[in-house]
Amino acid sequence: MIQFEHRPGILDLSWGHPRPGLLPVEEWAAATATAAREFGWRQLTYGYPTGPAPLLEWLTAHLNAIEDGGAEARQLFVTAGASHGMALAASLLAGPGDVILVDSPTYHLAFRILADTGATLLRAPADADGVDPAALAGLLATLRAEGRRVPLLYLVPTFANPTGRSLPLDRRRDLVSLAQRSGLTLLEDDTYRELTYDGEAPPSLWRLSGGEGVVRLGSFAKTVAPGLRLGWINAAPALIARLATLGYVHSGGGVNHAVATTMSCFGASGAYDRHVATVRAEYRTQRDALVAALRPHLPVAAPAGGWFLWAALPPGLSATRLLPEAERRGTSFAPGPLFYADGNGGEDRIRLSFSHLTPAHLTTAANRLGAALAP
Ligand SMILES: Cc1ncc(COP(=O)(O)O)c(C=O)c1O
């Protein structure tokens, strides 16, 4: 019934899912009742192509509040989550024969979505800080000199999956400037922006770009609940118009209309802000529990946001070889090579998620991993 495989005896650190106990069951039920009362039949008929106005209005105000202006309703298109937004944007911007560049490492489940366009995926040059704009300019020039069309670069610049890192501000500016000069579109996956534990998130590429050269993906999957299947695309009005006139919208109207109208009530009532404050505090505690329990075994840094630790293994140890040993000891993780589009790299790294388990279980899982690491 749900997208999760429970393996008895294993405290699994590989799943980037919310902790079930943090999902806002009661608050969502209240918003559902309010929306039914407030919208009546309008909630149960076809929806407006880019999303229902009450949600677009609340979301615009919310995005303006969290990033100090710059959001407009005409730059929004409601989707069934970030994955859906990615598939839609990529299908409009790229096609067979094109090259899509991807950060390295990056969110592994994006690879198939982007490859579904028929484009070839190539790694963008990156170092410990993320995508390197100068090296990227060189690669772009080489590919284009070979006659390749390179319409897109996919990246998660803020509290990234899998690294937890955020791209430094100077690189953000350089990337946006390169995109605007070269006609490359930056597909900014911004799903973790609001899960910040130590101060403000850096400005989005979308905000820095003024809406040119960047398409941003947002999601309610991490801040509220993945089962809602609700998110949005931020893009220039011309691209929003193309999205809104796709055949499936013409036939079926706006995506996920009943949930989208309920979200507008969840937002307008203040439940969204209260819930995000709660989960921030809980995930911060979970992060700290996992980091503290791992430190005797592995030198991990605490990420300032998101759901993941990207831990370096002791020299000579391979993530792929460690995995069965960890599972024998009752824990699991996502091995580094998963997050490289060509599978090359990351054998010295593992991704550990602190989103899904309680602090007590995270501590036990870390101790089990420590035992697997011991010679
Ligand atoms: C970076 C990133 N993008 C997108 C998704 C999927 O988002 P959604 O559930 O909104 O499709 C995830 C979920 O793990 C993610 O980590």
Image: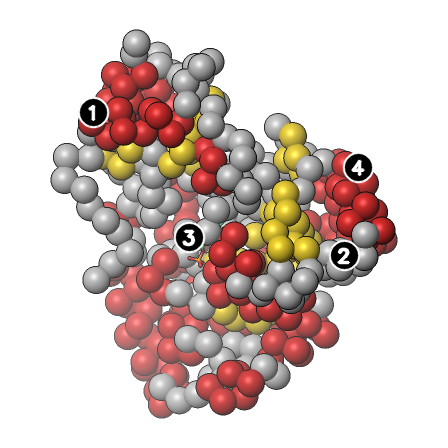
* Residue appearing at x 71%, y 68% in the figure: 236
* Residue appearing at x 40%, y 27% in the figure: 319
In terms of sequence position, does the residue under pointer 1 or pointer 4 come before the other?
4
* Residue 148 - label: 2
Circle 2 Cα neighbour tier, 10 Å, few/some/many (<14 / 14–19 / ≥20): some
Q: From the viewer's perspective, is the residue at label 4 or at label 2 nearer? A: 2
For label 2, the SS is loop
Cα gap from disc 1 to disc 4, whole angstroms: 44 Å
The residue carrying mark 4 is 134
Mark 1 residue type: Arg
What is the x, y in percent for residue 44? 36, 86
In terms of sequence position, does the residue under pointer 4 or pointer 3 come before the other?
4
Q: Is residue 110 toward the left or the right of residue 143 in the image?
A: left
For label 3, the SS is loop
Q: From the viewer's perspective, is the residue at label 1 or at label 3 nearer? A: 1
Q: Is residue 215 toward the left or the right of residue 80 in the image?
A: right
Cα gap from disc 4 to disc 3, whole angstroms: 34 Å
Total numbered labels: 4
Q: Do callouts 1 and 2 mark residues in contact (Cβ within 8 Å)?
A: no
The residue carrying mark 3 is 223
**Residue that sits furthest to the top in the current view:** 375
In terms of sequence position, does the residue under pointer 1 or pointer 2 come before the other?
2
Q: Do callouts 4 and 2 mark residues in contact (Cβ within 8 Å)?
A: no
